[in-house]
Image (tube, rainbow, N blue to C red):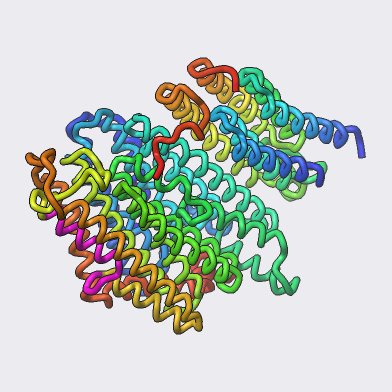
């Protein structure tokens, strides 16, 4: 199970590296996606319980409610991840549209070449 | 200790490798396609972690919508890094 | 009553279907309504109550709840007031732009996000509102779609979403160690963990660092400030005003809520003092060399944030009072100055200091208002900045760090120097031929500025008013257990 956290943190680190060191806007946005994927993996792993069942309301659930509660995985991180996925797709869309505008204005995707704002 | 943890760990490693490739490729279009693959892998991992609804969302949004958006953006800008 | 401050959220959706003429007044009505609601809540919160509203009727810690305490009220009051004035200001300022429907929608969304961050009692809810606020502000910075606004927005977006990712990761770590998302619940459980293990576990230190970096990016603390001047310069002036007076304040409020409630003052204090000191000094010196009015104001805003963090980091009652009072004052005069610069841009179409000159005779009221703002910013009596800066100096001496007070005083002098330089360059001096036909700013732009200037003077002459407004917030920060007890009965 610890391996999940290791990979999640590696993904976060990879996303950070890409975000800070790449010189292309689309690459930077890809890095952002990897970074958030890492966080989502971390959150889902947090809620997982070995041998657990999915926390979804079903008919069987009511037959054995305490047993279900003891075996189900934690649903809260899943709700968080769901919200976060939606938020991040919004940011992604906004970022990409800004990148398109930036390319129209500057004819480049390299953020360090956009230096109208200095001094 | 069945086969499942092994598969899961293998998938995680695969996921990481895909992400590294996506970030290091010079051709942005391939990079985005690899990222979509990574999203699908992540969705499978979510499924194995008993989060089927998240897996569906991740597959639809991460591999579907995001890829379409990226491809549109790349087609309006340039393909090489 | 307490539930009704969700109206902005509902109304934003309703707004999309509005026909063009009505939307200005609609936006105004929504912000005024929000302001009235907050004032209404103020009466009971100032009396020492904490309002708790349970969304969906679930009792905390299970359900999501909104809790209005002194800190939330202070931030909410600032946000509601400034966004109302900015909406009035935008009527004329933004008239020649297209796509105003989006503009007001995003503006209300931004306000809703800020109110949400101020009032929420749930840490994940805080993240969601923070993202709402962030996304709408990215879009507003890019609103003009010109070269510089796109560039400013991209920088803001990349750095800002990095910050919010850090916050989410911090939340994940906290959830992992406590198993709850309610701020009050986390605080009480972490306290239990700390006492049983005898020391602070590494994981909460990492989470704290993530939170400080994440909110620090939003506030514009020095190592993470690079986006801020670009974004403020690129945004339309009313948006710069709402970001300087609202978003930054909300960032401080959220940082304080998370760090003080969850981790407690002894752990956070030294960190805030260090960061605040660096931010204050470097911000002021960078402001000294700026050639663009809006950039200058942006750097001076960073420097003032340094004062606030420094003072609150001291952790004494006087320090926290001074910091919160300065937060209130800073919101008032910083948005005042941005609005005044907006008036100049509206008439003259430039904000570069070396192109401006001799505007004092053409725009006397704007000049007077700018001077009030500048002197208040520099901490001159009888304006509000004097009262709060004096409190900060006294707090520094009181807490046994006279050297901090000394540095803060020196930086005040630097502030005075660059603000006076800017005032002289813009409003005094020889008139250039270009500005022959410049007129005074329109009345609906002057009105919000005058209100803010009046607040500056009133708070300066009667600092007691300001102290009584920040008192409940200071009590809440010093003594979070009352908040915890109020939200979770029996905790």
Find out whether residue C373 is within the magenta segment. yes
Of C358 and C15, nearer the camera is C358
**Would you place residue A28 above or below residue C56 in this image?**
above
Where's residue A112, x and y in %?
51, 35
Where's residue A24, x and y in %?
56, 29
Find out whether residue C216 is within the magenta segment. no
Of C430 and C415, nearer the camera is C430
Residue reaching furthest to the front: C430
Q: Residue at x 37, y 47 (%)?
A: C112
- Check the picture and name the quadrant holding the N terminus of chain A: top right
Asked if residue C63 shows in the view, the reply is no
- Check the picture and name the quadrant holding the C terminus of chain A: top left
Q: In which quadrant of the rendered view does residue A115 lie?
A: top left
Asked if residue B63 shows in the view, the reply is yes
**Would you place residue C194 above or below residue B18 in this image?**
below
Q: Which residues are magenta?
A: C365-383
Of A48 and C198, nearer the camera is C198
Where's residue C381, x and y in %?
24, 74
Q: How many marks?
A: 0
- Say whether residue A82 is left or right of residue C10: right
**Would you place residue C13 above or below residue C333 in this image?**
above
Where's residue A101, x and y in %?
42, 25
Q: In which quadrant of the rendered view does residue C419 lie?
A: bottom left
Q: Residue at x 46, y 53 (%)?
A: C220
Dominant SS type (magenta): helix
- Say whether residue C365 is left or right of residue C304: left
- Say whether residue A112 is left or right of residue C238: right
């Amino acid at each position: 199970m610890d391996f999940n956290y290791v990979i999640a943190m590696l993904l976060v680190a990879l996303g950070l590296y890409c975000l800070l060191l790449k010189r292309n806007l689309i690459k930077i946005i890809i890095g952002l996606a990897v970074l958030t994927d890492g966080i989502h993996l971390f959150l889902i792993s947090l809620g997982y319980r070995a041998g657990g069942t999915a926390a979804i309301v079903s008919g069987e659930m009511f037959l054995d409610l305490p047993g279900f509660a003891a075996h189900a995985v934690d649903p809260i991180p899943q709700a968080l991840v769901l919200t976060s996925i939606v938020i991040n797709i919004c940011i992604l869309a906004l970022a990409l549209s800004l990148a398109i505008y930036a390319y129209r204005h500057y004819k480049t995707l390299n953020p360090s070449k956009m230096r109208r704002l200095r001094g | 200790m069945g086969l499942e943890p092994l598969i899961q760990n293998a998938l995680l490693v695969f996921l990481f490798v895909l992400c590294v490739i996506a970030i290091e490729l010079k051709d942005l279009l391939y990079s985005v396609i690899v990222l979509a693959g990574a999203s699908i892998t992540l969705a499978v991992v979510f499924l194995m972690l008993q989060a089927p609804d998240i897996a569906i969302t991740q597959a639809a949004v991460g591999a579907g919508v995001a890829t379409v958006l990226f491809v549109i953006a790349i087609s309006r800008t340039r393909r090489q890094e | 009553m307490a539930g009704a401050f969700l109206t902005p959220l509902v109304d934003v959706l309703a707004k999309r279907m509005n026909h063009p003429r009505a939307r200005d007044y609609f936006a105004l009505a929504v912000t005024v309504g929000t302001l009235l609601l907050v004032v209404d809540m103020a009466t009971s919160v100032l009396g020492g109550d904490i309002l708790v509203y349970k969304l969906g009727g679930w009792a905390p810690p299970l359900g999501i709840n909104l809790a209005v305490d002194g800190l939330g009220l202070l931030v909410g009051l600032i946000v509601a007031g400034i966004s109302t004035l900015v909406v009035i200001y935008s009527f004329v300022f933004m008239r020649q732009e297209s796509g105003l429907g989006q503009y007001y929608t995003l503006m209300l969304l931004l306000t809703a996000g800020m109110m949400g961050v101020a009032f929420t009692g749930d840490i994940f809810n805080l993240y969601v509102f923070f993202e709402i606020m962030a996304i709408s502000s990215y879009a507003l910075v890019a609103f003009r779609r010109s070269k510089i606004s796109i560039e400013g927005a991209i920088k803001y977006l990349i750095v800002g979403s990095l910050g919010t990712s850090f916050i989410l990761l911090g939340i994940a770590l906290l959830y992992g160690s406590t198993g709850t998302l309610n701020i009050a619940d986390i605080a009480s459980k972490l306290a239990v963990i700390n006492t049983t293990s005898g020391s602070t576990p590494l994981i909460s230190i990492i989470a704290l660092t993530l939170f400080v970096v994440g909110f620090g990016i939003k506030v514009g603390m020095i190592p993470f400030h690079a986006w801020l001047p670009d974004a403020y310069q690129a945004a339309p002036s009313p948006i710069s005003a709402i970001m300087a007076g609202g978003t930054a304040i909300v960032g401080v409020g959220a940082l304080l809520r998370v760090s003080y409630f969850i981790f407690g003052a002894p752990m956070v204090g030294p960190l805030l003092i260090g960061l605040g000191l660096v931010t204050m000094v470097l911000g002021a010196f960078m402001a000294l060399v700026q050639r663009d009015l809006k950039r200058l104001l942006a750097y001076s805003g960073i420097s003032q944030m340094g004062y606030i963090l420094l003072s609150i980091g001291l952790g004494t009652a006087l320090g926290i009072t001074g910091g919160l009072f300065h937060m209130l004052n800073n919101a008032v005069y910083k948005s005042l100055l941005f609005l005044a610069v907006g008036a100049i841009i509206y008439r003259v179409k430039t904000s570069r200091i070396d192109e401006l000159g001799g505007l004092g005779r053409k725009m006397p009221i704007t000049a007077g208002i700018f001077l009030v703002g500048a002197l208040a910013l520099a901490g001159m009596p009888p304006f509000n900045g004097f009262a709060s800066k004096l409190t900060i100096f006294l707090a520094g001496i009181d807490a046994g760090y006279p050297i901090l007070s000394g540095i803060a005083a020196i930086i005040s002098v630097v502030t005075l120097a660059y603000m006076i330089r800017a005032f002289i360059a813009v409003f005094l001096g020889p008139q250039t031929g270009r500005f022959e036909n410049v007129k005074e700013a329109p009345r609906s732009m002057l009105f919000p500025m005058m209100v803010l200037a009046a607040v500056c003077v009133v708070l300066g002459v009667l600092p007691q008013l300001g102290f009584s407004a920040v008192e409940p917030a200071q009590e809440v920060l010093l003594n979070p257990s009352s908040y915890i007890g109020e939200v979770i009965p029996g905790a």
